[in-house]
Amino acid sequence: MVTLGSIDYFNNLTEQEQLQEVSYFPYSIHYIQYPSEDVQLAAVSKDSSAIQYIKRPTEEVQKLAVQKNGYAIKYIKNPIEIIQRLAVQRNGAALMYIDDPSDEVKKLALQQSGLNLKYLFEPSEELQMLAVQECGLALRFTKKPSEQVKKMAVQECGLALSYMKNPSEEIQKLAVKLKGLAIAYIPNPSESVQKLAIEQDPANIIYIKNPTKRIKELVEE
């Protein structure tokens, strides 16, 4: 338990002594009323989450914290653009802690992982495209994707088909060409789609609910 006396202890230390304290116990910066930038940097370099105990961290301290751990941005009030960018470059999912990020910050997060699309509200088609281009399965976080977004998604990952309702035959073919197993997510595939699946691997016939006679014959040949 920290007492008033121990708080006085930390504040009566010289800067050199404070540096030594935070290098061992970074959270002790919580008890230093006006830590210098060097003391702040020393604490954060040891543990990025120590920034939560610094009332007014300098920009350099903020940069160091998010470069070590992007999630540290959740402890920074109203981070400026450069801090936001550094945070998502380090950990794309840090996007969840940023209110009203710029398109540039969103793009950086999606370039790291398309799945970070789940942290965006009503993303534009451009952002959806960027997300599914990086990870086709990010399609699951879109509400009404365009045909173009769907195409991009299945071209990156055929199994993205599992997140579509009534995909067009063109989309089905794109998905099955890339991943024959994707036919398992098509209720009534046409014979041409079935053929694409078994051409990739005859064993894919087990994923076709009602293979046509011709498809059965092709597998048996």
Image (cartoon, rainbow, N blue to C red):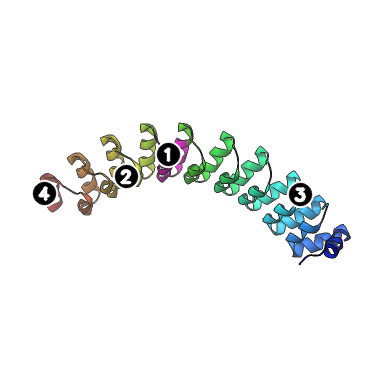
Contact between marks 2 and 3 (CB within 8 A): the answer is no
Q: Nearer the viewer, mark 1 or mark 2?
A: 1
User: For the residue labelled by badge 2, is the local secondary structure a helix, a strand or a loop?
Assistant: helix
Task: Tell me which residue sits at (76%, 53%) in the image.
Answer: 41
Name the residue tied to disc 1. 142
**Image-based side of 197 in relation to 120, left or right:** left
Quarter holding the N terminus?
Answer: bottom right
Task: Tell me which residue sits at (77%, 53%) in the image.
Answer: 40
Q: Which residues are magenta?
A: 128-144
Name the residue tied to disc 2. 178
| CA gap, disc 4 and disc 1 | 40 Å
**Image-based side of 127 in relation to 149, left or right:** right
Which kind of residue does numbered mark 4 sit on? Answer: Glu
Residue 44 part of the magenta-drawn span = no
Name the residue tied to disc 3. 55
Among numbered discs 4 and 1, the one appearing first in the sequence? 1
Image height check: is 74 above or below 144? below
The numbered dot on residue 217 is 4
Quadrant housing residue 29? bottom right
| CA gap, disc 1 and disc 3 | 39 Å
User: For the residue labelled by badge 4, is the local secondary structure a helix, a strand or a loop?
Assistant: helix
Contact between marks 1 and 2 (CB within 8 A): the answer is no
User: For the residue labelled by badge 3, is the local secondary structure a helix, a strand or a loop?
Assistant: loop
